[in-house]
Amino acid sequence: MNDNDRALCATTASLLQAAGGIASLGLAMSGIALGVLALTARSLSLTSCMGFGAVAIIGVFERYLALRLRLDVGLFEGLARGSIASLPALDTALSRIGMRQSPDAARSLADRVLGTRQLVQRHGITVACQAAMFLLGLLTQDLQ
């Protein structure tokens, strides 16, 4: 890898670390929604229960995406530092631990960065859906 590739890897890792704040928000909404459902489900309206339930269910998918992004942080940091020597070495290691099938063709670094950016966008959309359902749950609860 040349210096430009290492810089791209380091920048991508930084982007992924910054997206960790979004993951924290998703985790917090899931926890609060589960707490609300556990403590007050009987006094909530059906729509509010469904909203908070949707937050919790979407939260499972959000946690999966957050885990994938966390893995990518480590991989891009390894590529940037040189502890992962090359992309073929990365593919071999991922294949050996069962995270990727043996590739037919090598993926370029640019394709990997694009895929990671798309994963960040999907994660953001997932947390935005959680926030919408959380707001629905809050706005439709019957306060007594």
Image (cartoon, grey):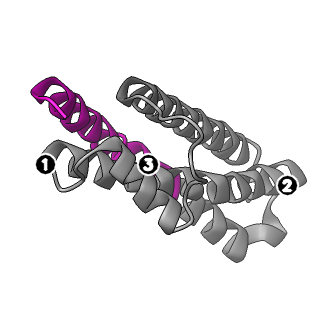
**Of the image marks 1 and 3, the number of the one nearer the N terminus:** 3
Q: Which residue is mark 3?
A: 69
Q: Which residue is mark 1?
A: 81
Q: Residue at x 18, y 42 (%)?
A: 80
Of residue 58 and residue 7, the one placed in the foreground of this image is 7
Query: At label 1, which amino acid type do we have?
Result: Arg
Q: Secondary structure at mark 2?
A: loop
User: Rounded to the nearest whole Å, what is the CA distance between mark 2 and mark 3?
Assistant: 35 Å
Q: Comparing marks 1 and 3, which lies closer to the viewer? A: 1
Q: Which residues are magenta?
A: 1-28
Residue 114, position as x, y percentages in the image:
45, 25
Query: At label 3, which amino acid type do we have?
Result: Leu
Q: Residue at x 65, y 60 (%)?
A: 60
Of residue 63 and residue 114, the one placed in the foreground of this image is 114
Left or right: residue 49 versus residue 58 is right
Visible in this render: residue 24? no
Residue 81, position as x, y percentages in the image:
13, 48
Query: At label 2, which amino acid type do we have?
Result: Ser
